[in-house]
Amino acid sequence: MIPFVTLNNGIQMPQLGLGIYDPQPDHDIRQAVLWALEMGYRLLDTATIYKNERQVGQAMRDSGIARDEIFLTTKVWNEDQGYESTIKAFDESLRKLQTDYVDLYLIHWPVREHRIQTWKALEKIYAEGRARAVGVSNYYAPHFEELWPHTDLIPAVNQFELSPYCYLPQELDYCRARGIQVEGYASLVRGLKSGDSRLIAIAEKYGKSTFQILIKWSLQQGAVTIPKSVTKSRLKANLEVFDFEISPEDMAQMNTWHDNTRVAEDPMDYY
Ligand SMILES: NC(=O)c1ccc[n+]([C@@H]2O[C@H](COP(=O)([O-])OP(=O)(O)OC[C@H]3O[C@@H](n4cnc5c(N)ncnc54)[C@H](OP(=O)(O)O)[C@@H]3O)[C@@H](O)[C@H]2O)c1
C-alpha cells in the first residue's frame, strides 16, 4: 500500500512512515509503534534525543516482523557530535534498538564546529555496513556547500521541516538536483494550522481531514513523510492518503501559503 522511493545508493525507503518524537513521558511509545507496525507502517523515525530507542527496539521485536522488512532511522544528537563520539553514540543506539544495523543514520542538526568530522564518522559507519544509508537533517544549501570539498559521499537523505507553511522550494530543488531524497518533518505542523479556513476548504473538497491533506501535499512534493501519532485511530487515518490526489491547481494554491511557521529551529541559525 505504501510506495517506496529509491535512494541514491539504490536502497528502497517507504515514502510514508511514523515520526516518533513524543515529549510526553506518560505516552506508551512501544504500544504506538506496535500498532503502527500492525497497520502496515514500515518506516520508523527515531533519534537519540527522543529517548525512546529502547521502546522502539522492543516494539520491533514484539511485532514479530522480520528486521529486513522495517526501515529504521535514528540520528546522532548534537552533544555527541565529533568523530569518535559519534561512533560511540551510534554503538549505543544500536544497543538500545536491539539491532546490529540501522537503515538510515542522520546528523540531527548541522552543529557548526563538529559537522564535518561527524560526517566522516557516518562515512565509516556506512563503509562498515552498519547503516544501509547515511544522511543529514536540517541542512540547507550553505551546509552542503561547506561539506562538498570534504567528501565523495552524497548524503542519501536530508530531513527538514516541510509543510505549506514552511515551504522553501529552493531547498527542495537543491536536494532534487543532487539526488538527495527530501524527508519532510512536522508535515502536520503539530496541528497548529487545523483552523486555517483555506486548508479546511480544501479538506472538505476532497472529503479528507486537514491532516490527511497536509500529508498528501508533502507526498506530492516527492518527500518522504513521517507524521507522528501515538493515537490508534490517527495512526490509521494518516495512512489513508493513497486513494486521492490533490489537483495541480490546489497544490499551486497551497504552495503560496508559506508564512515561515516552524515547530523547530531554523537551520540557518546553525550556520
Ligand atoms: N530532524 C528533526 O530535527 C526533527 C524535528 C521535528 C520532528 N522530527 C520528526 O518528524 C516527526 C513528525 O513531526 P512532529 O512530531 O514534530 O509533528 P507532526 O507530525 O506535525 O504533528 C504531531 C502531532 O499531531 C497530532 N496528530 C497526528 N495525527 C493526527 C490526526 N490525524 N488528527 C489530529 N491530530 C493528529 C499528534 O497527536 P497524538 O500523537 O497525540 O495523536 C501530535 O500531537 C517527529 O515525530 C520526528 O520523528 C524531526
Image (spheres, rainbow, N blue to C red):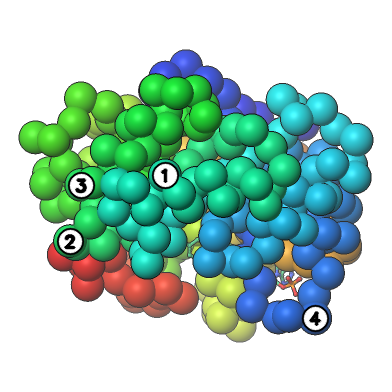
Badge 1 marks a residue whose secondary structure is helix
Q: Which amino acid does label 2 sit on?
A: Glu
Nearest-to-viewer mark from 2 and 1: 1
Mark 4 and mark 3 residues within 8 Å of each other at the beta carbon: no
Cα gap from disc 3 to disc 1, whole angstroms? 14 Å
Q: Residue 130, image x and y in percent?
A: 52, 29
Q: Residue 60, image x and y in percent?
A: 80, 43
Q: Mark 4 points at which residue?
A: 26
Q: Residue 55, image x and y in percent?
A: 77, 58
Q: Which of 94 and 207 is in front in this view?
A: 94
Q: Name the residue under label 2.
A: 113
Q: Which amino acid does label 3 sit on?
A: Ile
User: Above or below — where is 106 with respect to 189?
Assistant: above
Task: State left or right for residue 120 relative to residue 249.
Answer: left
Q: Residue at point 29% right, 53% down?
A: 82
Chain-order first, disc 4 or disc 3: 4
Q: Nearer the viewer, residue 39 or 117?
A: 117
Mark 1 surroundings within 10 Å by alpha-carbon count, few (fewer than 14), some (14 through 19), many (20 or more): many
Nearest-to-viewer mark from 3 and 1: 1
Q: Residue at point 60% right, 55% down?
A: 46
Q: Which of 119 and 228 is in front in this view?
A: 119
Q: What residue type is labelled 1?
A: Ile
Ligand 1 within 8 Å, label 3 CB: no
Chain-order first, disc 2 or disc 4: 4
User: Above or below — where is 224 with respect to 209?
Assistant: above
Cα gap from disc 4 to disc 3, whole angstroms? 37 Å
Label at residue 116: 3
Q: Mark 1 points at which residue?
A: 87
Badge 3 marks a residue whose secondary structure is helix
Mark 2 and mark 4 residues within 8 Å of each other at the beta carbon: no
Q: Residue 231, image x and y in percent?
A: 83, 67
